[in-house]
């Protein structure tokens, strides 16, 4: 009897802690109501932005947000709210705060001014470190409104501008205009250290095709106008940013942003053929991300018919390759170049127009399967033909054919079109 009494007492003591959850507000019907509730409690605001389909969001609910330390920390320091990004006022909220990944955690002061943003699943230790960082910033008066007010008086202060750019980057708020101003100030002061890597790492928003950042990037590209797999090249930097932003424009269904991105990419292409192909490739990514299956299929048919002629691709392969060699090996004859120790390795890194087309068709097939799985099954035979065509043009590439890629063809094909089939 005594044993059962002790067990019952333990259950009474332990159950409330184990079953306890952070005091998330899930009933507010507007963001203004959330702010008013936080003001009444005189607490910072913590927002967990999630979606019903988000795996990492569910992991956080089942793990970190069930941990006693997390619960105590949130309930003590924050007025916490969960917002579904795809329902009710969450749709407008995510748009206003530029949330495009889930889960996203926003920490705001009692007035609703943004202090800090973090993204992704994390364990209790990491989450509390992130929350403590937000609390410290708030105590020091650091928030989006503080920086906005400072900016009104410090638009010419290069040190402040860098700090502001970085802050906006960390809270995922648009800072392209501030970056443009920063570049303008460095020109005025003859400061040549524009730190493009820093600016691009923190950029949130579109690169204006006629702006100083675009001009700086294109200037770097002109110094080394080569499309290759060299990660730190100017072209790769532009390309990565273009692909990142075209996907964001599609998810937001922002055609104005899409057009700006295509215009920027247009400037980094040397021939009408590649300009048109890249315009259509980026538009296809936009259609996939914006869930426009019909428009995707129509343009994809045109893409396959227009840009896969092997004679045309070979022509542009030779043009781009000879241009690349003249940049990579200036003042050397063809014979001297081919005898160079680095020539064979350079062949592997060079990105021919044939290989670019092969990669783009492969990406589009995978992207359509990811975005429209049911429709993909219905159109599998069409996509299978396209994928095989991409493989065929790659194997006819006269610049360089990577044996590893060709050996992977069968396995990749089966993984995409017959995922239940095992290839030994």
Image (tube, helix red, strand yellow):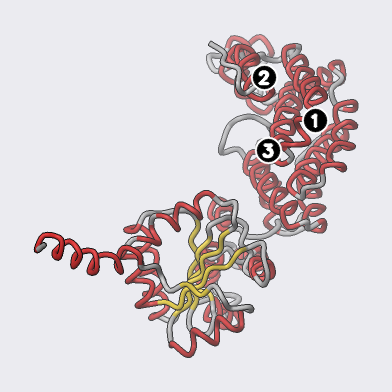
Q: Secondary structure at mark 1?
A: helix
Q: Earlier in the sequence, mark 2 or mark 1?
A: 1
Return the residue found at the far front.
1
Q: Residues within 10 Å of mark 2 (few under 14, many from 20)?
A: some
Q: Is residue 245 above or below residue 114?
A: above
Which of the numbered marks, if any, corresponds to residue 152? none
Which of the numbered marks, if any, corresponds to residue 370? 3
Task: Measuring from the top left, give residue 272's x and y in whole percent.
Answer: 88, 35
Q: Tell me how far mark 2 sits from mark 3, CA to CA.
A: 15 Å
Question: Residue drawn 56% across and 38% down?
Answer: 232
User: Which residue is label 1 attached to?
Assistant: 378
Q: Secondary structure at mark 3?
A: helix
What is the quadrant of residue 302 in the picture?
A: top right
Q: Residues within 10 Å of mark 1 (few under 14, many from 20)?
A: few
Q: Earlier in the sequence, mark 1 or mark 3?
A: 3
User: Which residue is label 2 attached to?
Assistant: 413
Of circles 1 and 3, which is in front? 1
Q: Residues within 10 Å of mark 3 (few under 14, many from 20)?
A: few
Of circles 2 and 1, which is in front? 1
Question: Residue drawn 82% across and 42% down?
Answer: 293
């Amino acid at each position: 009897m005594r044993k059962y009494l002790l067990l019952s007492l333990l259950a009474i003591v332990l159950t409330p802690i184990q079953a306890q959850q952070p005091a998330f507000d899930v009933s507010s019907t507007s963001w203004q109501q959330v702010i008013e509730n936080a003001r009444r409690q005189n607490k910072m605001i913590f927002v967990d932005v999630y979606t019903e389909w988000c795996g990492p969001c569910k992991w956080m609910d089942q793990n970190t947000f069930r941990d006693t330390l997390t619960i105590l920390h949130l309930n003590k320091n924050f007025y916490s709210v969960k917002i579904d990004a795809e329902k009710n006022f969450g749709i407008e909220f995510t748009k206003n705060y530029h949330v495009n990944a889930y889960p996203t955690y926003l920490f705001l002061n009692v007035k609703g001014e943004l202090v800090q943003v973090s993204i992704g699943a994390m364990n209790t230790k990491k989450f509390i470190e992130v929350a403590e960082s937000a609390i410290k910033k708030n105590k020091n008066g650091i928030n989006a409104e503080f920086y906005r007010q400072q900016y009104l008086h410090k638009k010419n202060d290069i040190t402040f501008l860098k700090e502001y750019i970085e802050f906006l980057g960390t809270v995922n708020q648009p800072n392209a205009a501030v970056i443009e101003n920063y570049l303008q100030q460095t020109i005025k002061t003859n400061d040549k250290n524009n730190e493009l890597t820093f600016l691009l790492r923190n950029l949130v928003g579109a690169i204006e095709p006629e702006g100083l950042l675009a001009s700086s990037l294109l200037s770097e590209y002109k110094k080394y106008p080569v499309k290759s797999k060299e990660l730190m090249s100017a072209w790769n930097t532009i390309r990565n940013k273009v692909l990142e932003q075209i996907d964001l424009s599609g998810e937001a269904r922002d055609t104005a942003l899409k057009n700006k991105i295509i215009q920027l990419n247009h400037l980094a292409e040397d021939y009408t053929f590649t300009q048109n192909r890249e315009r259509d490739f980026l538009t296809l990514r936009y259609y996939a991300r914006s869930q426009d299956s019909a428009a995707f299929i129509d343009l994809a048919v045109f893409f396959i018919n227009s840009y896969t002629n092997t004679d045309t691709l070979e022509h542009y392969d030779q043009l781009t390759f000879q241009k690349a060699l003249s940049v990579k090996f200036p003042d050397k004859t063809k014979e001297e170049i081919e005898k160079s120790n680095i020539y064979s390795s350079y062949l592997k890194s060079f990105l021919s127009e044939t290989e670019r087309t092969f990669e783009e068709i492969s990406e589009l097939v995978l992207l359509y399967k990811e975005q429209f799985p049911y429709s993909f099954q219905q159109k599998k035979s069409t996509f299978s033909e396209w994928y095989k065509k991409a493989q065929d043009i790659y194997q006819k590439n006269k610049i360089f054919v990577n044996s590893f890629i060709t050996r992977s063809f069968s396995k990749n094909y089966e993984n995409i079109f017959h995922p239940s089939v095992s290839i030994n």
